[in-house]
Every structure is written in C-alpha cells, then in structure tokens.
Image: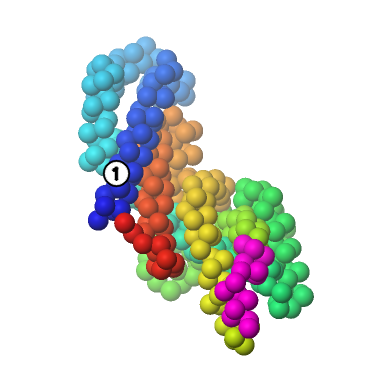
Amino acid sequence: MLFILKRLSFIFMVVWAASTITFFIPRISDVNPIRERFAELARLGGFAPGDLEKIVEAYNKAFGLDKSLWVQYYDYMSGVLRLDFGVSLNKFPKTVLMLIAESLPWTIGLLLVTTIFSFVIGNLMGALAAWPQSPKWVRSLSTSCILFQGIPPVLLAIFLILFFGLHLGIFPIAGAYTIGSIPKLSFDFILDVIWHQILPGLALVFGSLGTWVLSMRGMGITIQGEDYVLFAEHKGLSPLVIFRDYYLRNALLPQITGLALALANVITSAIVVESIFGLPGVGTVLINAIRANDFLVIYGIVLFLTIAVALLMALVELLYPLLDPRIKIE
C-alpha cells in the first residue's frame, strides 16, 4: 500500500511540474498566440484588418487571458484536474480532449504493436547473438541488426517511402486507409488499415530494434559466467531449458527497466512518423496545431503525453516484481 501511495505521489508531482512548466514557458514570451493566429487570418483575407484588435480583445476575454497571471494559473490547474485542456482555436468548437480522443486510438494501435514487436524480436535476437550455442548464421544476423541503432526512425520512414512506396509501389505512402473508403468495422476495411500501417510500423520497429539487440547482447555476455548458468549446465539440463529459464529470463530483467526509460523516446518517434505518413494520430494533430498556432491544443497534447509516460513508467515498475520474485513491493 505504501509503495502505491509513493507511486501516486510521484505521478502527482510529475503532472503538477509538467502543468506548471507548460503554463509558464509560453507566457515568458510577449507573443500573443491569439493575435498571431488572427493576424494570419487577416493577411489571408478572412476579415478586415481593422477588426483585429476587437476580435483579439473578445477572445482574450473568452479564454480568460485578460485576467492576472495567477488567476489564469489557478483556472488552468483547475481545468487540468478536470481533464479540461480548453477549446481548440483552429477547430472551434471542438475541445482539446475531443481532438485527443479522436486521434488517440490510431496512436495507441501503432505504438502498441510496434513496441511489442521491437522489444520481443530485439531482445530475442540479442540473446541469440550472445548465446554460444546459437548457429553462426543466427549470431551474424542478430549482430547485423545493431546497425539500425544509428538510424533515426525519421530517416527510415523517408527511405521506406522512397523505395517501397514510390520506387516499387508496393505499399501506400500516406493515409490511414484508402481515400474514399468509409470507416466501418469490416474485414476489408481492417485489412486496408493494416496495409497502410506497414511502412510506419516498420520505421518504428527497425528504429528501435538495434538498441534492444545491442543492450540484450551485452546482458547476455555478462550472464554467461554467472553461477546459476554454470550450475544449470553441470546439472545436465538441455540447452533450450538453460537458454529459456536461466539465461533469457535473467537477462531480460534489466531490459524491462530500459523499456520504461525508452517510452518517451518511442512516443516522440511515433509522433514524427505519424506526421510523415499523414496518419490521423496524436502526432499529426500536434504538428497541425503547431502550424496553426493553436496553443491550447499544443499545451494539452504535451501535458497529456507527459501524464501518459508517467503512468506507463509506474505500470512497468508494478509489473517488475512479477518477473523477478526477489523484488518485493513495499
């Protein structure tokens, strides 16, 4: 119980710190995002430039920006506690939470599949690369995957688009499904969605695969000389049992911690890859908000992602004792 309270206190502090930073940093600048947004619309002929000040004044009053800084901070933190991040300027009257809710399933689907694939395949190949009894071709193949560590997912995404999308024409290069398709729960539509996710999925999988292979290979080499591995060998256990129960399981424990630490980087990569492939995920919503100076959407998504990473790290820490009985939750 005490451990859970400590974790909840940690999450609360992270949310408070992220909320405070998100609130104050934009206000250091003298730039008024509402003025910038409507000045851009005025230049495009959306309304007469002479009405700009009246519109900005009305929106400042509507969004509470005419109040004192500390009153704005109190209103903002009260909204965060209610998960009320405000209303989008660019897609009014939609709220920020509505935009996140619409785009989140696409991001979760892409992240969940690619993270599981890269973590499982990368750690398995890293363990095989260090296991002395693995076939030589398996060790060579696993070791070659380390080369992907130095290639950012963004560059992999561009390469995949140019080669498999434009040159070979095998996979679609953009969009979540075929243009003109009506989203519905049918086998054909699900296949169409999966087909459109292959290139962005490969970019994210190969973008993190090398990291898992390299770190697992190092852990595997370290564990080979441990007493429990040597004891299992002297007992006459089969190589498969030794590899699975003594070697792989113990080498995998530090990787779980690495997964928690890598979540922020994985989410950041997914945001950029989503925008490159034009997927309707949180990343695309964030990029569009930045282009449109939709500051409330930007603040809301950044804060939401911070909360999500904190919760996922706490969840991984709770799952850790299930893998290692020596660790107890206190």
Q: Was residue 50 drawn as part of the magenta stretch in this picture? A: no
Determine the residue positioned at 29% across, 18% down.
Answer: 69
Query: Badge 1: how crowded within 10 Å, few (<14), some, or many (20+)?
Result: few
* Depth order, front residue of 149/183: 149
Q: Which percent across, then down, holds residue 302?
A: 41, 39
The magenta region covers: 219-234
* Residue that carries the numbered disc 1 in the rendered image: 9
Left or right of 233? Residue 245 is left
User: Label 1 sits on what residue type?
Assistant: Ser
Q: Which percent across, then down, holds residue 62?
A: 24, 24
The quadrant of the picture occupied by the N terminus is bottom left
Determine the residue positioned at 41% across, 58% down.
Answer: 316
Q: Was residue 224 drawn as part of the magenta stretch in this picture? A: yes
Whether residue 290 is visible here, answered yes or no, is: yes
Left or right of 24? Residue 211 is right
Relative height, residue 293 to residue 135 (above, below):
above
